[in-house]
Amino acid sequence: MDIRAITPDYAVSPQIEPGDLPAIKAAGYVTVIDNRPDGEIPAHLHTAEMRRAAEALGLAFVANPVIGGALTMENVTAQGAAIAAASGPVFAYCASGNRSSIVWALANAGKRPVDELVGLPARFGYQLDHLRPQIEALAKG
């Protein structure tokens, strides 16, 4: 597991296993967001299994599957709502962490400078520069 803290309150990661959840909790995260559709992963990593394991540890769990290349505004809105509802730091995962970074950046359009929304994920290799026009448009509302 590779926790990549985009901000002190939001981290992303490539796919995790149920056995990673105790370390995520120990690192201070209180909400886990699964951005991975079940169709991409083996059954033992499906949403229901991950939810069961997370909730057994007292972690809040949110399923917001983002289909690669088919991101929707519903995904962006759901990610923003999950982050806003969290009582502490949020940990989101997908295949590489990229989709979790993208929905974070888009959900924060207008709340943080565009350079920050692109630059913070870039520290971990997530190239979101191509999203600048979309982030700017969302910021204008």
Image (cartoon, helix red, strand yellow):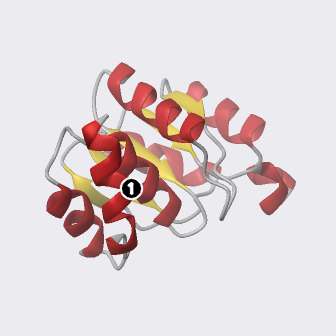
Residue corresponding to mark 1? 134
Q: Position of residue 129 (x, y in %)?
A: 32, 73
Visible residue check, residue 38: yes
Q: Nearer the viewer, residue 61 or 136?
A: 136
Q: Residue at x 38, y 48 (%)?
A: 106
Q: Is 119 located above or below residue 83 in the figure?
A: below
Q: Is 20 located above or below residue 53 in the figure?
A: below
Q: Residues within 10 Å of mark 1 (few under 14, many from 20)?
A: few
Q: Position of residue 55 (x, y in %)?
A: 58, 26
Split into 4 quadrants, where in the image is the C terminus?
top left
- Secondary structure found at label 1: helix
Q: Is 41 located above or below residue 23 in the figure?
A: below
Q: Nearer the viewer, residue 11 or 56?
A: 11
Q: Residue at x 13, y 52 (%)?
A: 113
Q: Residue at x 30, y 46 (%)?
A: 10
In the picture as drawn, the residue positioned furthest to the bottom comes out as: 125
Q: Nearer the viewer, residue 50 or 40?
A: 40
Q: Is 126 located above or below residue 137 in the figure?
A: below
Question: Looking at numbered disc 1 in the image, what kind of residue is underneath it?
Answer: Gln
Q: Position of residue 110 (x, y in %)?
A: 22, 40
In the image: residue 28, left or right of residue 32: left
Q: How many marks?
A: 1
Which of the 4 quarters of the picture holds residue 54?
top right
Which of the 4 quarters of the picture holds residue 53?
top right
Q: Residue at x 51, y 46 (%)?
A: 21
